[in-house]
């Protein structure tokens, strides 16, 4: 579905520190935004409805953000239309949305009104079992990710001891100065949070085209095969941009979304800063224009790292196994979810769902 008017993101995902959501960055009521909140169980047509809206918007060449479900990337959690200051979102668990300004900035649309409760109750025993199994698979995936986080933090301790901090600080200060110069805006800074990657049933997924579709005039690719230094540089860029009252789009890390950045985009100067592991992501972001690479290896004492070579090798093997366990359990959870959806689909009146969808699409796109 992606084209130049479309960007794909995640806003809620499992991380090494637990479930993390930035659904509060979907829309901004005080800036005139409106959100249609979809309620209803799996298989009620929420994602299909949002895909229809996105397809219509794209045909009209309206900028569209597709917010994917990390537990099933083929499914949508939300569709955002910035030009129209409108979004449509799945407001069910685990990213529950309850209206703060009902009727003013939000409207609830309950697709559960169109299911046959008698049919669902006939399958109550099967559904309850599937829901419980689904929860169990997700708990196992969460546990594996938490263990992975512990390994990553142990690795970080080794790398930090090998870091030539003064050398990095000197470089970062000069780099930031070269990017911003005397630039400063007389306005309130704004920051939008998004993620281009997540841990999914298919493994670590990255929406590379979303980065390309920003159309940045200059792209700084921070090559960091040890995945420790890039975050420090990106956080410095973010901090300086906020200090200069700029507009910022911060793209969060898949594993440590609460504390680590994957990328920062500054629309006002059309500059992109993105981290890349050249060892595991050799071809990623290769289609960006005017790329300037920053190799972070020069800020590490490689002799100090060499003494931990065996331990770091062991950490890599354990990390790979924990990631495999995570994706395996997410995959099993998705299989269960598909079985749940089949039962709900058989109990739905999709004529009424489609009628509701058509009215909603008409109401939204008539705003242009």
Image: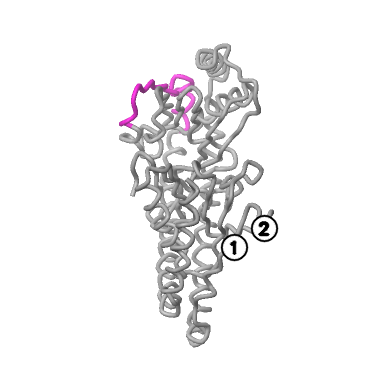
Whether residue 212 is visible, yes or no, is: yes
Q: Along the polypeptide, which appears first: circle 2 or circle 1?
A: 2
Residue linked to disc 2: 102
Residue 108 - label: 1
Q: Position of residue 287 (x, y in %)?
A: 31, 31
Q: Is residue 325 visible?
A: no
The residue carrying pointer 1 sits among few (fewer than 14), some (14 to 19) or many (20 or more) residues within 10 Å by Cα, namely some
Residue 100 is labelled as none
Q: Secondary structure at mark 2?
A: loop
Q: Quadrant of residue 95?
A: bottom right
Residue 303: in magenta span: yes
Residue toward you, 366 or 25 = 366
Answer left or right for 132 relative to 322: right
On the rendered structure, is 49 left or right of 106? left
Above or below, 330 relative to 168:
below
Magenta span of residues: 286-308
Q: Residues within 10 Å of mark 2 (few under 14, many from 20)?
A: few
Residue in the image at 66% along x and 28% along y: 188
Q: Nearer the viewer, residue 20 or 343?
A: 343
Q: Residue at x 45, y 64 (%)?
A: 357
Judge left or right: residue 31 versus residue 82.
right
Residue 87: say if magenta. Answer: no
Measured as percent of width and height from the top left, residue 169 is found at 57, 17
Question: Which element is circle 1 on?
Answer: strand
- Number of numbered labels in the structure image: 2
- Percent from the top left, x then y, of residue 96? 60, 59
**Which colouring convention does the figure follow?**
one colour
> Pointers 2 and 1 in contact (CB under 8 A)?
yes
Task: Estimate the x, y position of residue 241 in percent, counting from the top left.
Answer: 58, 24
Q: Where 282 falls versus 236 (above or below)?
A: below
């Amino acid at each position: 579905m992606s084209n130049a008017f479309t960007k794909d993101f995640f806003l809620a995902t499992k991380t090494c520190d637990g479930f993390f959501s930035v659904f509060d960055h979907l829309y901004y009521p005080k800036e005139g935004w409106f959100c249609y909140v979809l309620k209803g169980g799996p298989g009620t047509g929420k994602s299909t409805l949002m895909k229809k809206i996105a397809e219509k918007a794209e045909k009209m060449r309206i900028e569209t953000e597709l917010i994917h479900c990390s537990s099933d990337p083929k499914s949508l959690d939300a569709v955002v239309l910035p030009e129209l200051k409108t979004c449509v979102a799945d407001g069910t668990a685990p990213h529950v949305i309850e209206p703060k300004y009902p009727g003013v900035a939000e409207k609830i649309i309950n697709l559960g009104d169109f299911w046959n409760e008698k049919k669902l109750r006939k399958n109550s025993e099967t559904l309850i079992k599937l829901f419980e199994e689904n929860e169990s698979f997700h708990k196992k995936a969460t546990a594996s990710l938490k263990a992975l986080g512990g390994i990553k933090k142990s690795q970080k301790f080794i790398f930090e001891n090998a870091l030539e901090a003064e050398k990095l600080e000197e470089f970062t200060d000069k780099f930031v100065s070269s990017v911003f110069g005397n630039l400063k805006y007389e306005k309130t800074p704004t920051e939008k949070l998004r993620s281009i990657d997540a841990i999914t049933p298919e493994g670590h997924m990255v929406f590379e085209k979303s980065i390309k579709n920003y159309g940045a005039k200059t792209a700084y690719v921070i090559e960091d095969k040890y995945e420790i230094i890039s975050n420090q540089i990106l956080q410095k860029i973010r901090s300086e941009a906020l200090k200069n009252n700029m507009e910022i789009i911060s793209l969060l890390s898949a594993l440590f979304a609460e504390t680590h950045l994957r990328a920062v985009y500054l629309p006002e100067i059309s500059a992109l800063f993105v981290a890349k592991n050249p060892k595991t992501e050799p071809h990623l972001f290769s289609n960006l224009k005017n790329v300037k690479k920053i190799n972070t290896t020069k800020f590490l004492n490689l002799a100090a790292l060499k003494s931990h070579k065996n331990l770091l090798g062991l950490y890599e093997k354990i990390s790979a196994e924990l990631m495999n366990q995570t994706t395996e359990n997410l995959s099993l959870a998705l299989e269960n979810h598909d079985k749940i959806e089949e039962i709900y689909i058989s109990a739905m009146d999709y004529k009424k769902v489609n009628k509701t969808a058509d009215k909603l699409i008409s109401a939204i796109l008539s705003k242009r």
